[in-house]
Amino acid sequence: MRQSKLSRFLQFFVSGPLLCTGIASAQSGDRILKFHSEICVARDRTLTVSERFEIVNETGLFGDSFHRRLWVKAVGPHRAKAGGIQFINTKVDGSDGRVQTSTENNVFDIQVSPQSNHWSRGTHSIELHYTAKHQFLIYDDFEDLNQDISGEWQVPIDKADVELIFPAGWFDDTSISADTSTEPNSN
């Protein structure tokens, strides 16, 4: 059995203050003040993700749910199984939160809400933990993880950062590149 080498190329996109709805966002105080993503990359390619959000729900834009949308990685010539998200749990303002999930058009939607099922006005903290599998593309001589970390939002993100952790140590020939953007996705 071939010893698995972690990707020689990991590419992450941290879409800094991403403005997806321009005018609506500019007129609203609703926003993500801080977004922190901690990604633990295991030798078996499992990603254990811990994310912290600090949000402002000034006008009620978040409604009854905070939606964390993640792309579902499709099966293909270099990915034997479809990507999956599992073992999801959350805390809202330090207490257990409610989680509902759905998948539509290759997007896995994690809906987070407080126990009361309604976001009050003001600032809230959200902790979200999940495991992601089958995110890598596997080629003959390298592995590739191309990941948009922050995602697309209807509100601006004031500050975003990502921390990559390799608990088994750094792998030979591994390279990482990261890109940031302040523009909405043009696709």
Image: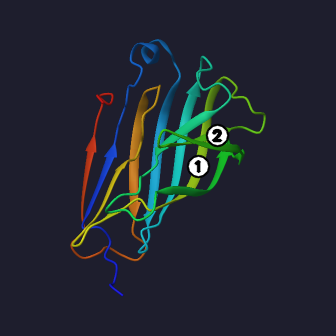
**From the viewer's perspective, is residue 25 above or below residue 141?**
above
Give the mark count. 2
| Mark 2 neighbour class, 10 Å CA radius: few under 14, some 14 to 19, many 20 or more | many
Q: Are marks 1 and 2 in contact (CB under 8 Å)?
A: yes
Element class at badge 1: strand
Q: Which residue is mark 1?
A: 128
Percent position of residue 148, x then y: 37, 45
Q: Nearer the viewer, residue 166 or 4?
A: 4
Q: Residue at x 46, y 55 (%)?
A: 38
* Image quarter hosting the N terminus: bottom left
Furthest residue toward front: 77
| Callout 1 amino acid | Leu
**From the viewer's perspective, is residue 56 above or below residue 151?**
above
**From the viewer's perspective, is residue 167 above or below residue 118?**
below
Q: Earlier in the sequence, mark 1 or mark 2?
A: 2
Element class at badge 2: strand
Q: Which residue is mark 2?
A: 112
Percent position of residue 19, x then y: 38, 25
Q: Nearer the viewer, residue 123 or 24?
A: 24
Percent position of residue 71, x then y: 44, 45
| Callout 2 amino acid | Val
* Image quarter hosting the C terminus: top left
Q: Residue at x 41, y 31 (%)?
A: 158
Where on the picture, by quarter, is residue 110? top right
Q: Give left or right: position of 62 versus 19.
A: right
The tag on residue 61 is: none
Q: Residue at x 65, y 53 (%)?
A: 89
Percent position of residue 40, x then y: 45, 64
